[in-house]
Image: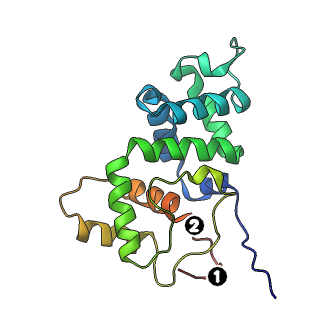
Amino acid sequence: MTEKRAAFLPFHALNEFMTDDYRLEVVRAVLNQVETLSEQTRLEIDRQTKDFVTVPGFRNSAKAPSSLRLKPSILAFEKNPRFTAAIVSAWAELHSHLRAQVYDLLVSLGWEILPADDDRTKIPGFLPSWPAGQDFDMLNSAFVDKYPDAQVQSNDISLMAVWLGGRLPFPNSPESP
C-alpha cells in the first residue's frame, strides 16, 4: 500500500505574494480591530504576539498599543508561520461576509476545501499547488461576475482564496483541484 504525503509550504510563504503596502494593510486592520474578534481569536493573537513580537519597553508586547506593535508585527508576519496564520485567520474573521462569498465561489469552481469556518491555523501550511487553468485574475473576474455589487479589492479576494483554499500558486507546482 502506498502512503500519500502532502508537502506544505509554511504559512509565511504567503509573503511572496503580498506587496509591502498590502501586508501593512492586513496587519494594521487586525491590530486595530483585535477587540472586535472572538475571544478565541483574540487570545491567539495575544499569545502569538507575546511569543514573536518585541516592543521595546514592554515585557508583554500584546499589552503595547497597536501603533507600537505594527512594525514588529510585520516583521513577525514575514518570518514566523504561526504568527502569519494567526493574523490571516483574524483578518478572515473580520471579513466574514467576504469569507462566505469566496468560499461559495471556490466551491462552485470545483475546489475541494475545508468548511469556511474551520480553523486553518491547525494545518501545517499551504499546499504548493493550484487548480489547473485558474489564477488570481480568473478568480477575481469570477468573483466580480458572481457578486457584481460587491465593493471588494482584488487583493482581499486573492488573500481570502489563498486562506480558504489552503493553497499557494507557486510556479511549476503540480496543478490539482
The color scheme shown is: rainbow
- Residue 48: which numbered mark, if any? none
Where residue 1 appears, x then y in whole percent? 81, 88
Read off the residue under disc 1. 174
| Dots 2, 1 in contact, CB < 8 A | no
Which image quadrant is residue 71 in?
top right
**In the foreground, 93 or 129:** 93
Where residue 139 appears, x then y in whole percent? 39, 70
Q: Distance from label 2 to label 1 (Cα)?
A: 11 Å
Read off the residue under disc 2. 167
Residue lying at the far front of the rendered structure: 1
Q: Is residue 153 visible?
A: no
**In the foreground, 159 or 106:** 106
Q: Is residue 8 visible?
A: yes
Marks 2 and 1, the one that precedes in the sequence: 2
Q: Residue at x 51, y 84 (%)?
A: 132
In terms of secondary structure, where does tag 1 sit?
loop
Q: Residue at x 31, y 50 (%)?
A: 97
Q: Residue at x 73, y 70 (%)?
A: 7
Q: Is residue 35 left or right of residue 57?
A: left
Query: How many other residues sit within 10 Å of disc 2, few (<14), some (14-19) or many (≥20)?
Result: many
Q: Is residue 160 above or below residue 95?
A: below
Q: Residue at x 42, y 30 (%)?
A: 33
Label 2 amino acid? Arg
Label 1 amino acid? Pro
Which image quadrant is residue 60 in?
top right
